[in-house]
Image (tube, rainbow, N blue to C red):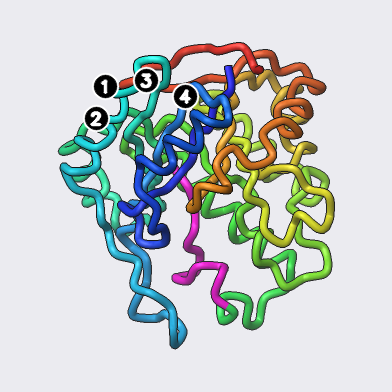
Amino acid sequence: MKIDCHNHSLFSPDSSRTPEEGAEKAREDGIKYLAFTEHMDLGFPNDARPEGEFVFNYMITGEYFERVRRINAAFPDFEVCAGVEVGYTPEDVGEICDKLGALPFGYIVNSVHICHGLDCYWKKFWDGYSREKAYREYLDCVRESLDAPYRYDAVGHLGYIGRPSPFERKTLLYSDFPEELDDILRTVIAKGKILEANSSVGGCAAEGTLCLPDISIFARYYELGGRKVNFGSDSHRSERTGYNYPSVAAALKDLGFTHWTIVRGGKEYKEVID
């Protein structure tokens, strides 16, 4: 099955496309399962944003679920899931738990966007940081996020820090921090979570990186016994839906992965990687 488990629409503040537009593009491309994962970044530090940055509001409403319901009713041969991407911030865990418990999300991605109070896409994030210090601190945040008390199904874009990295070598490789990454991967496996292959790699693309986490990290994940994987394009525009799916799927199959793990209504299902 061809899938895409990480997408955004106008119910996220950084996308303007409708869910209907995203679903139409996915169907045209032969995708059979599409998850919208709208942003829930409750702790995004808008008051510290650089001049010109937009405000990262929480925009999920009941209309979101209704529009996804209508898409599924119109196309019985195609499945759309109303999911969410939680941006983990420890001080907001209580509110995150409340919102997740109040809404019928079918799939939940847990991601880290904020470290030391800033999104790493902001230039000021990097002030005074070496590559090793910044990346190590990011991994500490990821490890902490794995112990979040709320339900989540997948770990989103491990290696996100490489997308906007100002350093000559951007991609987070397994060989950079093997002890820290082993701890993260073993925890993902022990908790039964899915490791997402996110094909939005930003500046890492120039290094030949196919997905986040890098294939070297997936190789170690497989070696440690990890088998739960899925694919997400992290698309915010319809032309990016399913981006680089064939290459990512082929690379994972070469490592030995045979099935995607997708989530329907909070329950996991296996689908052969197409």
For the residue marked with disc 4, what is the amino acid? Tyr
Residue indicated by mark 4: 33
Mark 3: which amino acid?
Arg
Identify the image quadrant of the C terminus: top right
Q: How far across and how far down the image is residue 48, in percent?
A: 39, 81
Closer-to-camera residue (263/18): 18
Nearer the observer, disc 3 or disc 1? 1
Residues in magenta?
110-122
Q: CA distance from mark 3 to mark 2?
A: 16 Å
Q: Earlier in the sequence, mark 1 or mark 4?
A: 4
Q: Is there a contact, CB below 8 Å, between mark 1 and mark 4?
A: no
- Disc 1 and disc 2: Cα gap in Å? 5 Å
Residue type at numbered disc 2? Arg
* Cβ atoms at labels 3 and 1 below 8 Å apart: no
Q: For marks 3 and 1, give the CA distance.
A: 16 Å
In the drawing, what numbered circle is on residue 264?
Answer: 3
Q: Quadrant of residue 91?
A: bottom left
Are the two marked residues, 1 and 2, in contact with CB atoms closer than 8 angstroms?
A: yes
Dot 1 corresponds to which residue? 73
Give the side of residue 26 with respect to residue 78, left or right.
Answer: right
Asked whether 18 falls inside the magenta stretch, the response is: no
Q: In terms of depth relative to the viewer, which is nearer, 143 or 63?
A: 63
SS of the residue under disc 1:
helix
Mark closer to the chain start, 3 or 1: 1
Amino acid at pointer 1: Ala
Callout 3 touching callout 4 (CB < 8 Å): no
Q: Position of residue 223 (x, y in %)?
A: 76, 22
Give the spatial CA distance, label 1 vs label 4.
Answer: 14 Å
- According to the image, label 2 marks what residue? 70
